[in-house]
Image (spheres, rainbow, N blue to C red):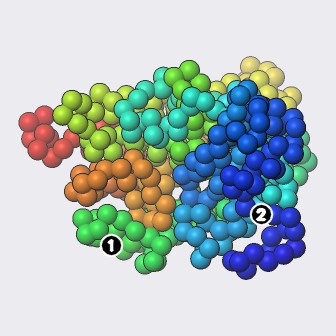
Amino acid sequence: MAENNVGLPTPAGYFPLDDARLRVWLSGLPSLAAHVGGDAAHWRIDEVGDGNLNLVFLVRGTVGGVCVKQSLPYVRAVGESWPMPLERAFFEHQHNQIAGPYLAGLIPQTFHYDSTLYASVMELLSPHLILRQGLIAGRRYPHAATAVAEFVARSAVLTSPLAQPFEQVFDQTAIFSRNHALTRVTAELIFADPFEHLPRNRWTSPELDQDAADIRNDANLRAAVARLGHRFLTQKEALLHGDLHTGSVMVTEADTRVIDPEFAVYGPVGFDVGVFIANLLMAFFAQPGHASAADSRQTHAAWILAQAGAFWRHFAQRYDALWQENGGGDAWPARLFTTPAQRDAFARARRERLREIYSDALGFAGAEIIRRILGFAHNQDFEAIADPLRRADAERRSLTLARALLLTPSPFADMDAVLQHAQRLAVPIADEATA
Ligand code: SR1
Ligand code: MG
């Protein structure tokens, strides 16, 4: 072990990649270099990482290309003042190893993992875009919501004791329970930070100063979010992606891939469900901020909202079907439910389980919205709105929905009720009078 300049131990042999080092390293791995093709000196290499944490390189040559993702020993978006262990690449690799076999076609193929450089070499997804960027640009991806729902449903059932022997699940849970650094990020950034005065928090100021203070000072909201934080840390239901926002999905019109499972941990299924729904809801509320003279974005906003419904419906239907088809694990042993009466009881229990996931998801969605507007890690849906008044308006409407999801969820008997409420909240005040 050596010490890097941020004081964290890094393994001997680790170095951050750059254009020159990547050419040398990759050309020393002939089977990977073959995916790129041609003379390494002529490869086109672009560093495209736009997330908070890692280096991401796209390498293109005469045959095709690869994507190389590497951990840095600190939070990229902040710099060396926020050290961050390199192991996140290991947990992303473990997710690919353990959940990957169930997720064919929904994740990029991984060709190689280097445990010294904490780097993965993956399939180059082209001409894919990050889903969030596409939604901001006004583009539609007709299959994205159902593909992400399929990813969540397969992960939720097939990595859990519904489908696996408990010994296997316990061993996997033990692996991901070492994902301390990124689980701490989630525990603090989602479930605590927005309720404290911290230098790393920010919001659209001064427009949202009062909203931020109201949220910080709302004891019931603190309790609702803390309760969910407790569930996140204790309910080891299935292997989560752990950071399933619209920036973790790459799309074309026909193809959808979920990327970046470095926050993977065993947790409550409703967390992934709620985070993804929250990010669609924020994309929806942000649309007026992206309007132009030619496009009010109303139609696009309505389409995005409908995707949240399609996502939940597909998830619920597939979770139920996959459970019935793969119920060979130690939880809910299939052999106990064979007579008509037993099968009825099992069907009722499955409906109850989906109600539980739905209820969790509403709360996690509320917590995700609040942290994206008042915490450290914001999203481009709002950040790309240059006018602070318009940005604050979209953010305030989102916060209003988040509070309702967390504090008064009972009117939201089903997802349609959530979407109708979001639609009502999105109507500008002036239009409400004439509606
Ligand atoms: C310090 S990392 C901040 C955020 O970026 C990641 O994408 C996660 O969402 C995390 O909460
Ligand atoms: Mg990420």
* Mark found first going from the N terminus, 1 or 2: 2
SS class of the residue under badge 1?
A: helix
Is residue 26 shown left or right of residue 184?
Answer: right
Camera-side residue of 155 and 139? 139
**Ligand 1 positioned in quadrant:** bottom right
Is residue 358 among what the camera can see? no
- Residue type pointed to by label 2: Phe
- Disc 2 CB within 8 Å of nearest ligand 1 atom: no
Q: Is residue 296 above or below residue 391?
A: above
Q: Which residue is mark 2?
A: 15
Where residue 127 sits, quadrant-wise, is: top right
Is residue 317 shown left or right of residue 138?
Answer: right
Where residue 388 sits, quadrant-wise, is: bottom left
In contact (CB < 8 Å): disc 1 and disc 2:
no
Tell me the mark number nearer the camera, choosing from 1 and 2.
2
- As drawn, the residue found furthest toward the right would be 167
Percent across and percent down for residue 421 are: 32, 41
Is residue 387 among what the camera can see? yes
Neighbor class of circle 1 (other Cα within 10 Å; few <14, some 14-19, many 20+) is some
Camera-side residue of 408 and 305? 305
Percent across and percent down for residue 294 are: 21, 29
Neighbor class of circle 2 (other Cα within 10 Å; few <14, some 14-19, many 20+) is some
Camera-side residue of 67 and 164? 67
At 56% from the left edge and 31% from the top edge, which residue is drawn? 128
Q: Is residue 376 above or below residue 114?
A: below
Percent across and percent down for residue 41 are: 73, 42
SS class of the residue under badge 2?
A: loop
Structural distance between the alpha carbons of marks 1 and 2: 43 Å
Residue 213's label in the rendered image is 1
